[in-house]
Amino acid sequence: MLAAAAAAWTTSARAQKMPVIGYLCPESPDLFDSRLRAFHQGLREAGFVEGRNVAIEYQWANGQYARLPALAAELVARHVDVVVAPGGAPVALAAKATGTASTIIFEMGGDPVQLGVVDSLPRPGGNITGVSSLSVDVSPKRLELMHELLPTATRLAVVANPTSPTASSQLQKLRSAAETLGVQLRILNASKEEEFESVFAAVASEAANGLVFTSDPYFAFRSRRLADLAIKYGLPAITQTRDFPIAGGLMSYGGDFVQSHRRAGMYAGRVLKGEKPADLPVQLVTKVELVINLKTAKLLGREFSPSVISGADEVIE
Amino acid sequence: MIVRDRFRGLFPKYFLALFMAVAIPLAINGGIEAWFGYRDQRARLDQLLGVQASSAAAEIHNFIFDITTQLGWLVQQPWTDEPDEQRRTDAQRLLRQAPAIASLTLVDNKGHERLYVSRLGLNRIESRADRATNPALVGARASRVWFSDVSYNRGSEPYLTVATVGNRPAAGAVIAEVNLKLIWDVISAIKVGQTGIAFVLDQPGRLIAHPDISLVLRGAEASTSQPFRSLREAIGPGVGFATSQDARGRMVAASAAAVAGPDWTVVVEQPIAEAYAPIYAALWRTAALLAVSTVFAGLLAYALAHRMTEPIKLLEEGTERIGAGSFEHRISIQTGDEFQRLADSFNRMAGELALAQQHQERIAKLKRFLAPQVADLVDRAGDDSVLDGRRTDVVVVFCDLRGFTAFSAGVTPEEVMGVLSDYYAVLGRVIAQFEATLISFSGDGLMVLVNAPVPVEQPALRAVDLAIEMQKRVQKLIAGWHARGYQVGFGVGLAGGPATVGRIGYEDRLDYTAIGSVVNLAARLCASAADREILVDADVAASVRDRRSVRDLGNRQIKGFDEAIPVFGISYDAH
């Protein structure tokens, strides 16, 4: 009897297998490594460790954002318990578009209310909630920082990704900020890596000599390439992620991705524990960081004002 | 059996009494201890929660106070009309150092905005916008440090506006927007016991800080804050902690403390099960101790009751056995107390009873051949050593019937036995009367001893008087017998002198007897005595010559004696 009960327990334990997280990633594992580690850390803080008490199914778009809806549908079809959609608004929107009944936890830089992903921050509604890193909101600050570095410049270049859902709202804010700052904007588009060089070449050949990148995951994950091009063309540029100055770019201003991905992991854990997404307000990242690279500034023959240096969270020398 | 039942009842009585004597004081002590322990623990819990609440309030206060202190650095120097690059650097540095500050507005002594720096919005430098009527500025000018009500950014993140002024109007004022979400670092680090938490409510009762950030992000909603507000109301302004339900519906012990400055309240709560755990543990400990003590009391009472009733049982059995005649039985009690003494005296009594019984048996034996008076004498002496063999002067009396053999051959045995019965009845009374010792019967003959085993005064005289009384009584019988035609006579012979006296025979058949020539002489004198005759030897005759009439019958040849022996006759009045 006891043996039968034990056997039944074992089979039921096997049948009651680990919960599964579906992880929809817009990039390759290599590029996403630092974000994934932050996600795992958050998951661990909520009490889950991959392979021990939770399984994770990954879908990698490898930079081909157009594939995201198909990959999301594939993930949903596997009946995962939670869909995690990190790395930007396109991913969250693709996941939401599947109409899955599973909970979706997003991680993005944009405003999820404005994008129509959630109803409100405290009451997201539906089966979706997550973390916003505020990177999209601070695009005008990037223009301001560039203006401060180049106070005499009357024209600054802005690079946008036309395929990004937040592109138009960011450009609108940037135009408004440019008006306040008294500069003109030269808006350039790039949605593929091959288009980057032409953007830099165009700016280098024109009067506009500072590049402000809008918040966009596609740009963020290609910081090294952008930094190389900035050095090559001797152009001061600013992006949203610290990866850029670390790779040799001039500076970055944006939400702390470690914090946002970690919190997404914590939320995924809480949902696995049975909490309803409707009860989990959308979290905004508290840390927006400024990272500057003095080495690059020297290389470019530019100088940061003391107030910028003292306000920087990290200074690379 | 009844006695046994009563003793069976004694054990439970003793047991109960002893058990109660130990268990009741223990129970009372345990109860009192538990009550005071409970009170002490409650007082301790009250103190503990109070301290936790104050310490949590101090930490929250420090969080705010740190920010105001840092803001103070921005209002040290007086403003000039020139743009203040240094102050801008300081403001940027402050933003970096104090992550909770979202934006800073610096205003000069005229109330004009000189600098605005923000994490999210565009900075404004020297906008000179008039902020004189800004409530923050008005408040700070009035009270040096001013706190706004808590507002919720986009209905989610709680924000506080803090304004402070310098020590002189020329230094202007600074207004900071503080993101209260960052109190999370402070509040989540506060642990109350194992699972207890702390949270912060603003003056109207909205949730500002809680270890679960998702609750704080909905703090603006009445439904979110309501349970927390209820808990604060349950605690009230009074001293001491309150027990109430928390937001998750679990019972908690909670205490509150005010945060100086922004007029907030910090509430610390601990699940009641955990808060009371030491109380429950103490109660359990007391209960367990009581249970152990009770068992111990029971064992003790059992052992004591057993110790008390066991000797009584032994005594009871012993007395029963002694009562049943087992005088050799001894009660063995080695308790060293009154019971042992009682057992010892029982044992002594049993010994004495055995002795008394032996004595009784001896006396009964003595009575067979001693006159009752003599037997009693021996009895009173308590010593039968008088029966021991010795040599002493005795008077031996023999008597028998003349012509009895011929008579007995001619009549029926019944008539023989009837005659003998009457005869011995008469003789027995006489022997008893004179306290003589009956030695033996043989048919119609009888041997009696005087002066042994009990010495008497003037044994010869007594023996002679005995013989006279015998003759007198028997002759009366003979007179009757003659009337019936029985031709029998009665003769008596006495002799005095030394003889060996003592008990002879074996175990159950012991007789007292005398051995010596005096016995033979008395027997021969009897044999030669004719009817109505009492023959005595010279010794006896000499002893009684003056007091009784003694006739000298000259020397006679007596069988068994070589020479003729002087024989005397005793005359007696037949009537």
Image (spheres, rainbow, N blue to C red):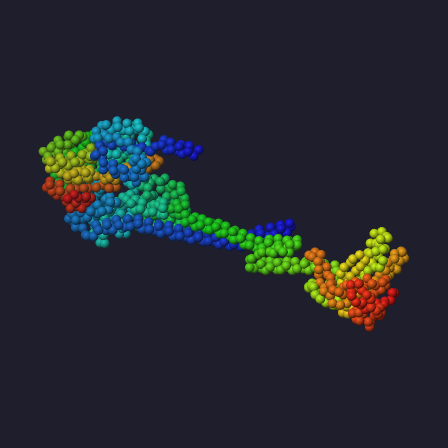
B94 horizontally vs A302: left or right: right
- The residue nearer to you, when weighing B60 against A299, is A299
At 44% from the left and 50% from the top, the residue drawn is: B285
The outermost residue toward the front is B562
Measured as percent of width and height from the top left, residue A24 is found at: 26, 31
Q: Where is residue B364 in the image (x, y as percent from the top left)?
A: 72, 58
Is B148 on the left-hand or right-hand side of B435?
left
Which quarter of the image is occupied by the C terminus of chain A?
top left
- Left or right of A235, for residue B440: right
Residue at 83% x, 52% y: name it.
Answer: B413
The picture places residue A57, in percent across and down from the top left corner, at: 28, 31
Between B413 and A285, the one lying in front of the other is: B413
The answer to whether A297 appears left or right of B383 in the picture is left
The residue drawn where x is 79% and y is 60% is B446
Q: In which quarter of the image is the N terminus of chain A?
A: top left
Q: Can residue B238 be seen in this view?
A: no
Name the residue located 83 percent from the left edge and 63 percent from the top edge.
B529
